[in-house]
Each structure stands twice: as structure tokens, then as C-alpha cells.
Image (spheres, rainbow, N blue to C red):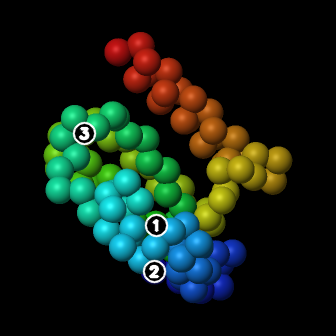
Amino acid sequence: TNGTGLNLSTKSMKWFWGQYLQKKSDAKNPYAAPFNARDFRGVAPAIIFTAEYDPLLDDGYNYAQVLKRDGVPTIYYEYPGMIHGFFAMAGVTPVAEAAQQRLADEINALLTQ
């Protein structure tokens, strides 16, 4: 979904992925690609934000689901109408400011549990 035409493309993401890995076999390493982990039980709580028009939307959603499946406390928000990188655009869109505040509030809530 959203692989072309909206700031970041699937083609670009494949290029970034190639730059990220030192060697092809690293793609199977769960530290590089968490979906390769067999089990997520016991990992730290997660806060996952996705953007409606991000080619990584499905990845973020699916990651949240497997964390929840394995009992990891997981907070998931999808921001409608947003693109990849919106979180850093606080001077451009009030949605980014609200997302930053939401993240701060969620972190504070986790720290006071």
C-alpha cells in the first residue's frame, strides 16, 4: 500500500534497506528485522505510530499485532492523512505536534506504572 507517489516509495525503501544491511544474510537477523524473531515475549512495551500514506504502514501495523499476540504491552496509533516522516513536521502540521505530545504522554504513563 502507498508504494509510490507520496514522499517515500517502496523503491526508495528497498534502497535504504540495502544501505542498512552490511551483508545480505543480515536480513534474517532479528536485530535488523524484528519479524524474524521467533518470540517477542518479555520485550519492553512498545508505542508504534504509523501514517496512513506511508509505504511502511502495513509493517508497523503487523509488528504491533505480533507484539500484542505475544503479550507485549503495545500502543498503536495510525494517523489519517499523514505521510512518512510527519512526526518531525511540527512546524508544518498541528497533527505532528499532537503526535509528539501523545508520545510524551504515553511514555510518561508507562514510566509511572
Q: Secondary structure at mark 3?
A: loop
- Which image quarter is the N terminus in? bottom left
Label 1, label 3: how many angstroms apart (C-alpha)?
A: 20 Å
Q: Are marks 1 and 3 in contact (CB under 8 Å)?
A: no
Where residue 103 appears, as percent x and y from the top left, is 54, 35
Q: Secondary structure at mark 2?
A: loop
Residue 62 visible in the picture: no
Q: Is residue 108 left or right of residue 71?
A: right
Residue type, mark 3 in image: Val
Name the residue rendered at 32%, 52% in the picture. 64
- Residue 1, label in figure: 2
Q: Is residue 49 left or right of residue 40?
A: right
**On screen, 74 above or below 49?**
above
Residue type, mark 2 in image: Thr
Where residue 106 appears, as percent x and y from the top left, is 47, 30
Lower position in the chain sequence, tag 2 or tag 1: 2
Q: Secondary structure at mark 1?
A: helix
Lower position in the chain sequence, tag 3 or tag 2: 2
Foreground label between 3 and 2:
3
Label 3 CA crowd tier, 10 Å (few <14, some 14–19, many 20+): some
Per the image, the residue denoted by label 1 is 57
Where residue 14 appears, as percent x and y from the top left, is 53, 80
- Residue 72, label in figure: 3
Seen from the viewer's position, the closer of residues 47 and 27 is 27
Q: Is residue 45 left or right of residue 90?
A: left
Foreground label between 1 and 3:
3
Q: Are marks 2 and 1 in contact (CB under 8 Å)?
A: yes
Name the residue rendered at 49%, 50% in the picture. 49
Residue type, mark 1 in image: Leu
Name the residue rendered at 18%, 41% in the picture. 41
Q: Quadrant of residue 25?
A: bottom left
